[in-house]
Image (cartoon, rainbow, N blue to C red):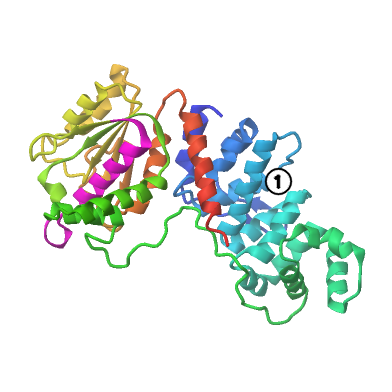
Amino acid sequence: MNAELIAQLTAELAASDEPLRVSRSGRITGPAGADAHDAAYAADAEAYALLALVPGTSVEQRAGILLRLLGASRTGMSAQTRRTVERVTRVLVLGLPAHTVGTVLLALRHRRANHKHVTRAALRLLTEHAEAATFVRTHRRMAVSIVEHALGKATARGVARALRTGEVVADVRRSFLRFVSDPALATQRLLEVYAEARVDEVAVGVQRLDLDLDGERPAVVTATNRGDLAATLVHRFRGGDSADLDAAQERYLAAAAAAVPRFPGRLALVIDRSASMDGYGEREWAVRSQVAALELVLRQRSAELVTVYTPGSGTDLAGGVVAALRERPDLVAVVSDGYENTYPGDLARVAATLPRLGVRTGVVFCTATFSHSDDLTLRRPAPGLPRRAFWHEADFASLVLWMLFQTEAADAAEWQRTALRERLSIVEGGAG
């Protein structure tokens, strides 16, 4: 998959598009950009599947990816590609809303996609999804259609009848139970699909997977509940200094860095050291501590890290970018609260001029905020630059993964693939 196609797809992934729908007549409508998705799948099925794990990808786009992964034959795939596609399919089935997965499977029924991996996905939805019981109760007709497509109408009804009556039929295992991990629960769920009976609301053993790895965030944000590493640094900025703080910082740094993908190239950070970064009142040191935490993590997770600090108490971000580019990095990341109080507009002018000078190095803007609800209207000094905000330590992994998709380094595609494979393993760890 070439860099241009990857860039096009990643730009579309976060778009909240038209949801996947299947009309009674069988007409299927969904997110735009089908041609690009088809081309990407044909070029590199593994890389395409992994794009479903890019942070912030919309439910609609993930549903479209799942539709392609389930609708295509896997004949001829390498063992590694097949395994990755199977793993991504599983986390999408367990991580997307049950009704969304049901709609994907209904679309496959109308397309007559009769693959064994479709059968497994259908039964996984009905037996392993955290919302399975509610889905069967509220969308019984859809559930019946899905089961009968997965197993065959006559087979599904015959298996249900045999399970209901206790009749011993060899086809029950061959046609049904061999596809499921929990035969008892699968038996119960199939009987519920065909019976107008109460659906058991007992949890099925897994939580709905967190595909974006957002984790829990505090309802009320303070300077010291935005991650353990940042909280420790707040205490340091307030004057704290002890062996206990040293030990805590090392411990929290190791934990924070473990969740962040590696940046294998040369990364240049332009860090805003202006007075506005200090904050005041209840927010004092919150933003500066989070930026300092990010820098510490990147020192551990970057092959080469160059840091340029803005001079004095002002915000000369443009000068910092020019200085960073002299280091010939693979990417320049400006980390600031977004208030450009020295030479306002200068960063935007420099950013617009660089391509005309033949500079191909990517420059991105990372906005450090106090919380997810900060108003950024007046905090966009270079609207033309790719921009992403962060406020919690748990944002670091998504932020660095996003950086990997902003560089035009020769090995960027492989860096992205490696990071997404690691992310897949972390998402899978949320099951059970």
Judge whether residue 220 can be spotted in this image: yes
Q: Amino acid at mark 1?
A: Gly
Give the residues drawn in magenta, as a range.
279-305
> Which residue, given by chain and number where applicable, does mark 1 sit on?
71
Q: In the figure, residue 142 lies in which quadrant?
A: bottom right
Q: Residue at x 65, y 37 (%)?
A: 81
Q: Is residue 321 above or below residue 90?
A: above
Q: Is residue 410 above or below residue 16?
A: above
Q: Is residue 314 left or right of residue 91?
A: left
Q: Main secondary structure of the magenta part?
A: helix
Residue 75 placement (x, y as % from top left)? 76, 37
Residue 133 as seen in the image, left or right of residue 366: right
Q: Position of residue 146 (x, y in %)?
A: 73, 61
Residue at 61% across / 63% down in the picture? 99
Residue 260 percent across, percent down from the top left? 40, 44
Residue 286 in sight in this render: no
Residue 378 picture location, percent across and down: 20, 48
Q: Residue furthest left?
A: 312
Q: Residues within 10 Å of mark 1 (few under 14, many from 20)?
A: many
What is the quadrant of the N terminus in the image?
A: top right
In the rendered view, would you say 123 is above or below 49? below
Q: Is residue 312 left or right of residue 31?
A: left
Secondary structure of residue under mark 1: helix
